[in-house]
Image (cartoon, rainbow, N blue to C red):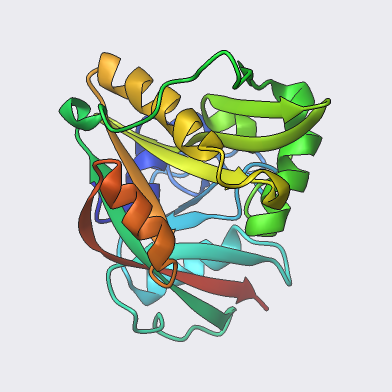
Amino acid sequence: MLRNPFWHALSTVHARFALGVGPTAATPGGLESARPALALRYPPDILPFAAIAEMSVPALRELAALLTPGEPIYITDLSDAPPVPTPELTYLSLLPGLQMLLRPQSVSAFPHATAEIAFRKLEQADAPALVALTDRAFPGFFRRNTIQLGSYYGIHDRGELVAMAGERVALPGFRELSAVCTHPDHRGKLFAATLMGLLARDHAAAGLCSILHVSAANTSAIRLYEHLGFESLRPIFFHRLQRL
């Protein structure tokens, strides 16, 4: 499943979010087809991500049918080779990443929350603050309804959200840690690691493994995650496509 995480998330735990043209998911218009879907996507107000069952022209053309003209989308693959060209899609960019895994028995390295770190679980009403904070680190990845994908924890300072971490991909047996970021004025205080620890312990208590995806170029983050107990699984590549 982890070799094609967004596909298996949209086919299982996150099937309620999936938009497609087969019986795996409802189409944007609510219609269904008798043919199994080759492409699935999250609604645009939740995530700019889609997935295909296989890297093929039919799957990519089905993906294009789920996009509005001019809309960009990310898909993942284990290869850095651009997808096969199709008339409906143009290739924008490649983001090399690394997939990492934390086993339930490896959560001891995370710091515990202290009285000085006042965290709380975030709610839908916090969405504008979440989008604003994540846009500092990775603009466009977090949307107003991304928070619906799982649990999110945040730390505030004088009413401002200054650190957060949450869940994105949900698979049977696995949950992805995502949107881990800290305001530049508050780095070095272990806020991000503390919030990740809250989620990782939640996962471990439920018998789930935590996963994450990090830019391959972000070597400092990779070193931190390894220190916290994550092990590298495989390179994974984020391809950005756009509907013509």
Position of residue 170 measured from the top left corner of the image (x, y, whole percent): 39, 34
- Between residue 215 and residue 188, name the one nearer to us: 188
Q: Can residue 52 be spotted in the picture? A: no
Q: Nearer the viewer, residue 111 or 55?
A: 111
**As drawn, 155 above or below 138:** above
Is 158 drawn above or below residue 130 in the view shown? above
Q: Nearer the viewer, residue 19 or 212?
A: 212
Instruction: Identify the residue at horizontal 32%, vertical 42% (top origin).
Output: 211
Q: Is residue 63 above or below residue 172?
A: below
In this picture, residue 193 sits left or right of residue 104: right
**Residue sitting at x 54%, y 80%:** 93
Q: Which image quadrant: the C terminus? A: bottom right
Q: Is residue 192 visible?
A: yes
Q: Which residue is found at the position 40% from the left and 49% from the top?
A: 6
Expressed as whole percent of the image width and height from the top left, the position of residue 196 reads 44, 33
Q: How many marks?
A: 0
Identify which residue, 217 or 83, lies in the foreground.
217
Where is residue 26? Give x, y as percent.
54, 38
Q: From the viewer's perspective, is 93 left or right of 173?
A: right
Q: Position of residue 118 (x, y in %)?
A: 63, 18
Which of the 4 image quarters holds residue 162? Answer: top right
Instruction: Kindly give the residue lying farthest to the left in the view shown.
Output: 105
